[in-house]
Image (tube, helix red, strand yellow):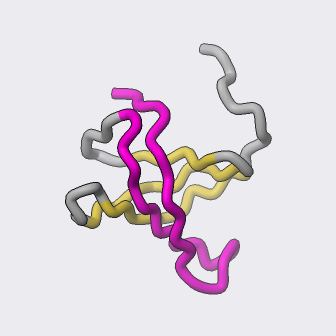
Amino acid sequence: MSYRRLCSRFICNDSASLLTPGNQERCLLLKDLSNRGAGVFGNFPLNVDNIVKINIHSPFLFDKISSKQARVVGVEK
């Protein structure tokens, strides 16, 4: 498997949630963060190029829930 990320990753393993384009909230596991993205695990399908909002629940990184808008760039099934 090739290494896709150009920026170094910060391993988190924290909880997060995602708002789908249909405004449904889904639970995620935030695996890692970098300057250019986030690695997440979920048990629901996502489509490449979807725009989603991720709420990061990481008390060791942020004082409050951090919300970021993101574009799905890769999916493993």
The one nearer the camera, 19 or 15, is 19
Picture quarter with the N terminus:
top right
Residue 76, given in percent of the width and then of the height, sits at 40, 28
Residue 67, given in percent of the width and then of the height, sits at 52, 71
Examine the rendered structure and indicate whether residue 6 appears above or below residue 22.
above
Residue 19 lies left or right of residue 10; in this view the side is left
Q: Quadrant of residue 53?
A: bottom left
Extreme residue toward the top, this view: 1
Q: Residue at x 56, y 74 (%)?
A: 66
Residue 30, given in percent of the width and then of the height, sits at 52, 55
Confirm whether the magenta stretch covers residue 62: yes
Q: Residue at x 63, y 57 (%)?
A: 12
Please state the extent of the stretch shown in magenta in the rendering.
48-77
Residue 51, given in percent of the width and then of the height, sits at 40, 50
Q: Residue at x 70, y 49 (%)?
A: 34
Q: Residue at x 49, y 60 (%)?
A: 69
Q: Quadrant of residue 49?
A: top left
Confirm whether the magenta stretch covers residue 65: yes
Picture quarter with the C terminus:
top left
The one nearer the camera, 17 or 53, is 53
Examine the rendered structure and indicate whether residue 55 appears above or below residue 21.
below
Residue 26 lies left or right of residue 65; in this view the side is left
Extreme residue toward the bottom, this view: 63
Q: Quadrant of residue 39?
A: top right
Q: How many marks?
A: 0
